[in-house]
Image: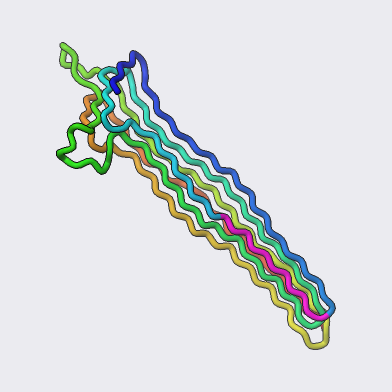
Amino acid sequence: GKYSVTDGLSVDAQSKAYIFGLAGGLSAAKNVGIGASVDYEGINITTEAYVGDKVNVDKAGSITVKAESIEDITSIAVSAGGGKYFAGAFNAGIHDIKVDTSAHIGNENATENDEANEANIGTTDTNDNSTVGKITIEAKDDAKLSANAGGGTLQVSGAGVASSLGAAVEVLEKNVSAYIGKANIVANEIDIDAINQGEIINTASELAIAVS
């Protein structure tokens, strides 16, 4: 398509994921008690904002292409076990997350000879000035992950075992890209930013008590 914009052209894509996971296990038995819990979060998120191939913008005050992804994920896994001879509590909080965030103009994979599919942004007027002002391309990902695993056991016997195990596991893959692909661009200013930030908090707490 062909576009002429007096003021500004803006292309925005945004995704927000707010996830709370809770898993719990409880066991009480006369002889052997085992409590177990697992909270698993498997997430794939793709956010993309772009001015694609074969797009012609001959005039615009400004052009903004912005992609933003926000993830706020909390996982809690708690278990408890009680028994006379053996008491066990086993729990895990696991995140397996893949996030792709991209903002771009033109096709990154286009070949050098693929001129028919180029994006054409801006030109010069009769005074040799650009017909496009500022171009801003920004991709941003902000992730906050909190995994909490806790367990407790109580064993009462003359010869017994109390065992409590917990784990908080994070598998996080984030790809953030901002770029200009196959395109012809004439502009007064171009600003390209890729921002990847995040916070991960893992907590594993266990309590085992044996009374003889």
- The residue located at (23%, 27%) in the rendering is 120
Residue 62: image location, x then y, percent: 33, 21
- The residue located at (54%, 48%) in the rendering is 144
What residue occupies the far right of the structure in this picture? Answer: 30
- The residue located at (83%, 84%) in the rendering is 157
Asked if residue 73 lies left or right of residue 45, the reply is right
Examine the image and state in which quarter residue 208 appears.
Answer: bottom right
Q: Which residues are magenta?
A: 31-41
Residue 159: image location, x then y, percent: 79, 88
Q: Quadrant of the N terminus?
A: top left
Position of residue 178 relative to residue 150, above or below, is: above
Residue 118: image location, x then y, percent: 22, 32
- The residue located at (32%, 18%) in the rendering is 61
Q: Is residue 195 magenta?
A: no
Q: Is residue 34 magenta?
A: yes
Position of residue 56 relative to residue 47, above or below, is: above
Examine the image and state in which quarter residue 112 appears.
Answer: top left
What residue occupies the far top of the structure in this picture? Answer: 126
